[in-house]
Amino acid sequence: MEKQKYLNNLNEKQKEAIISDKKAIYLHAGAGTGKTTTLTNKIVHLINNLNIDGNNILAITFTNNAAKEMRKRLKEFIPYHDFSYLTICTFHAFGYSFLKQNINYLNSNLTSSFFIIDEKENKKIIKEKMDILKLDKDKYKVKDLIKKISYIKNNKIKKQIFEELEIPKKINTKFHSSEEQKVFDLYEEYLKNNNFLDFDDLIIYTYQILKNNPSLTSFYQKKFSHILIDEFQDIDLIQYQMIKMISQNNFIFAVGDPNQNIYSFRGADPLCNDLFIKDFQADVLYLDQNYRSTQNILDKANLLIEYNYDEKQNHFKNDLKSNMNHGEIIYKNFQNDKKESEFIAKKIKKLIKSSKYNYKDIAILYRINQLYKEIENNLIIQHIPYIIKNSISFYQKKEIKDFLAYLKVLLFPKNDFDFKRIINTPPRQIGKTTINKLEQIANEKQISLFEAMDYVPETDTINLKINNLKKTFQKLLKIFHDESKCNLSNCIHLINEEIKYSEILDQKEKDKNNYNKENENKIKNNLDNLQKFFDSENKKQKGTFVEKLNELLNTITLHSEKDDNDKSQVLLSSIHKVKGLEFKIVFVIGWEDNIFIDDTEKYGKKNVQEDRRIAYVAITRAKELLFLTSANSRKFLFHNKKNRFARPVSFLEEMKFSKPKENIIISEPNKYEPIIIKKVANKVSYKAGEKVMHDIFGKGFIIAVNKDILSIIFPKPHGIKKILITHSTLKKI
């Protein structure tokens, strides 16, 4: 009986899922129903009761933090067990581990010492390729090209999969223009030449190798007899096929909630849920006992998501139930976003004053990031501490990125990307002219920038600078490859001693009269912390210094999620970023058409269902108090939205919110009546080249006129904005 002690605090449906001996199970776990507890206990059951070797278990999670949390919980349940041999990781981490051992199956020039590039590095490379091709920056946006490249890379594989499944599906595998195709070709060539992989490659290459090498696939089928997948609703078709290939005839346990599928923009496909049940002939079990929210909050969530079901989706219907006391759910409509944000700030002050809540109990959620600015202003005015989710992480700080770049170049000197980052860091008086000269030599001789340093003519004006740089790297490489002197425990300090990074940066700031002792200390502390982290990893990892370092640098890229903040602060976040989190009090703002709901004329029914799922996720984050707010007008203007005066979103009607009474409305207009704009008799005409004044963005310069929309460039940080000609505060100057 002692072996089953972990089942004591679970409900009957959780126990059923854990002890079931069915080969394939789809556990439909609604929001707040204890899915992580169930999944973790399933692993405990496999090890404790069924004596399954940890080597034979693969658990896939959606985030690195979820993987960490699962390991922590397992350690609590079975403290004496060694979990180091148990594979708990994300799909991308699995792909990384797989490719480290099997990338040679690709028959490309990529080696097992490859580096993974993060999103910022990805952006920098694509921007560089756009500059080489001299693309029109108004016509081609870096952000859009990044999305398109990822979209096309994945679609090429997905098209093949749909054809094999004999599912008719229109899949776009071509770029809109030859210029976009050229950027893609240059980008892919650059990755291969520099031994780089992006995050898409980790999945795509793993899938391709498994598909084309049956004997290797068979090895992984035997290795992982039991496979568990968390957040199954968020996986894409390629990830699903990967799992399908390695789980042939194995035990597979998928936990998901199709009602929380909100990542279609990342490729998540609801079809995978149906395919899983069909392909594996899976039993569908349900968790519907919610341990997070009060019943009246769940009632609204259930009412809303009901509109997403049709006859085909009845097996995914899952009404949530709660035994929690009655909480409060309030909807308020405001005249504008200023009044909305004032109300929220004052309400937070009042809640804190009651001494029942701390600031960290509160979250303010929004569908789109532009919404938080007005809220932030009022939190500052009211002296309310806050944090915005996904502020800069430790590994994205400049000094950290600089030192990681040094290490990558020392590991692989042909790495042009990181070499360009550090060629003048710290400052060495090497500018664009020198870099252009090196690039010219590299292109002519088809070699790397590092190698090009050897071919700079002695008579060239840049020769002295390059010689000094070569000497620096020769010293670094000598130290780096002497394991008696250099290891993970001291490599950061050794590099800093040689390049004088901290000293030179400090002097540069003093010369510019920008010196700040606090900033100097921050840089030094950050480098010390990086060295301490490396030192701790040195004791854990096995292999040579070079092997350990390569592994560590890729692990940093894969695991660079920012840890949650422990301080008592109100959290401001997009809804997508808080999936899996919970708060006693939740404000969800911006419940308006064309803000909470995308343009249905363009995207149709399927997109409205995803919008509804996003609303469902937002609502089910709240434990005790839930505030939903809308505003009849907002200061900002999205060029792709129809009009800045909006109706409250139809989801409110679906949740049976009654029209607010006069005494609780903080706005003059009725709940479902937008402000009506009178037609202007003589609409002002504008043309490119004219100057204008905007009440928020200040003075601007019109660069283009397209029907009723002006493209205006404003001073930093605003940049180019698209604004309607009829915008009330826009004036010619």
Image (tube, grey):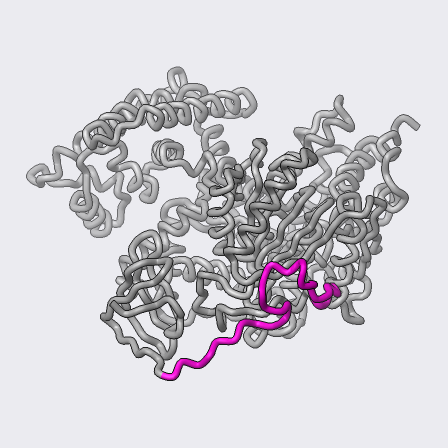
Q: Is residue 241 visible?
A: no
Residue at the image position 82 percent from the left and 57 percent from the top = 319
Q: Is residue 193 visible?
A: yes
Q: Is residue 440 above or below residue 300?
A: above
Would you identify the image quadrant in which residue 41 lies?
top right
The foreground one among 387 and 315 is 387
Q: Main secondary structure of the magenta part?
A: loop
Q: Position of residue 190 (x, y in %)?
A: 36, 51
Horizontal side of 559 relative to 76 (left or right) equals left
The foreground one among 580 and 565 is 565
Q: Which residues are magenta?
A: 653-681
Horizontal side of 281 relative to 206 (left or right) equals right
Q: Position of residue 182 (x, y in %)?
A: 35, 64
Horizontal side of 20 relative to 636 (left or right) equals right
Q: Is residue 458 above or below residue 298?
A: above
Q: Position of residue 466 (x, y in %)?
A: 17, 35
Find out whether residue 655 is within the magenta segment: yes
The foreground one among 241 and 651 is 651
Furthest residue to the top? 484
Furthest residue to the right? 1
Find out whether residue 695 is within the magenta segment: no
